[in-house]
Amino acid sequence: MKRLASLLIVLPLLLGGCASTPQLSAPPPLFADASFKPPSETIGAHNLFTLSPAMQAYLHSPAFEALLRSKGLERGLIDALYSKTDLKLEYDSSRTRTAAETYEARAGNCLSLVVMTAAFARELGMTVRFRSVLADETWSRDGGIYLVASHVNIALGHRKRNGLLYDETSEHELVVDFLPPPEASRFHTRLLEEEDIVALYLNNRAAESLVQGKIDDAYWWARAAVATNPPNAIAYNTLGVIYQRHGDLVMAERALRTALEREPESLVVMQNLGPLLAATGRTAEAAEMARRVASIEPVPPFQYFDKGMVALKAGDYDAARKLFEREIKRAPYYDEFHFWLAVTLLQLGEAKEAREQLALAIDTSTKSDNRQLYSAKLAHLKRQSANSVRIY
């Protein structure tokens, strides 16, 4: 399964990661409720881990109980949830879901899958540890908004016989990760509290609402995330992006500076704050911020891809191919890069290589709609190839 957990937005602004820092003093007033309409949906995470009646029925079904008896609690639970023959869960990054929503949809991103797994495990009396995986950030774009993904997984285990202390050395502990095992095993992790998972969920819903153009809902989701007072920058940075999109530049700066206090070296926050400083006439401060960003990341995400699109539209297919290949080299798991390289290869008459890139686009896509689109195009390309063989 593909990687994706917490979302980070750009306008070209970005929302922050999920690194923990020490608790700081309370931030200045950050909310402007009167500037936004009431939300169109219920805001909050009170039912995040709640099992639905359907989940309860599944948990107590004869087949499920037999699987637990034959394979043990941890392995039996994971085999039941993620085998290809039972629930048939799919990875889908389009929306972060509660445990019950994930079960009903049979789909979710890594945060949704972690939440659902934790809900089942707790119902079975197992211990649960949430973990942040310190992997490289993954960038994507949606409707002109940039998203940065971090990753979480979960460790399941038993309690010691006294029922009080977690047995960290227990041979029964099982780490469940939704990255391919060879890739997941090489990354370090950091333990998260349940409050961190709640904040990530609320922040993701804010980011997803903003991508959908629901700025009022996005505000209320971000407000709820900030109200959890997370020690990291993510929720404050998201709120700052929402204010900027809404035109509240004073409040945007206040939220972003609060985020930067929590994570002074956050590239994401600096990339948000710099353009805001420029927009409010502080060109010298903006230039200094841009220099700091460039010293950390000389080539921004999507730079080669954007140049490749310009070359493709101009008919310079050789240049487009080289630029797309450069972007893929540093971001091999982003489906759009493989798709547009496939389009370019078709223009160059390299149908076999184009089919290979379309297959990679399907494999790396985190959205079911995109996978269906790429699959249809690949099937069409294969039919064309077969027809060409028959003609000759």
Image (cartoon, rainbow, N blue to C red):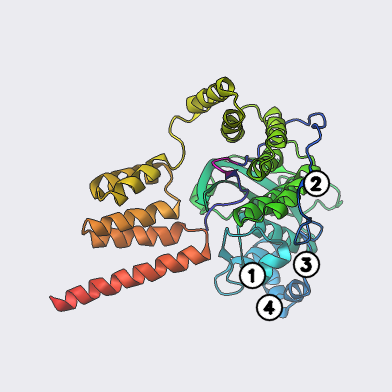
- Look at mark 3 in the image and give the residue it sits on: 51
Front-lying residue, 223 or 23: 223
Label 2, secondary structure: give it. Answer: helix
Label 4, secondary structure: give it. Answer: helix
Front-lying residue, 346 or 184: 346
Q: Quick one: label 4, few (<14), some, or many (20+) residues within 10 Å?
A: few
The amino acid type of the residue labelled 2 equals Asp
- Tell me what residue is drawn at x 61 percent, y 51 percent: 5
Comes first in the chain, label 2 or label 3: 2
Q: What span is colored magenta in the figure?
A: 10-14
Mark linked to residue 33: 2
Front-lying residue, 252 or 281: 281
- Asked whether residue 375 is in view, the answer is yes
Comes first in the chain, label 1 or label 3: 3
What is the distance, in whole Å, between disc 3 and disc 4 at their CAs? 18 Å
Magenta stretch, main secondary structure, is loop
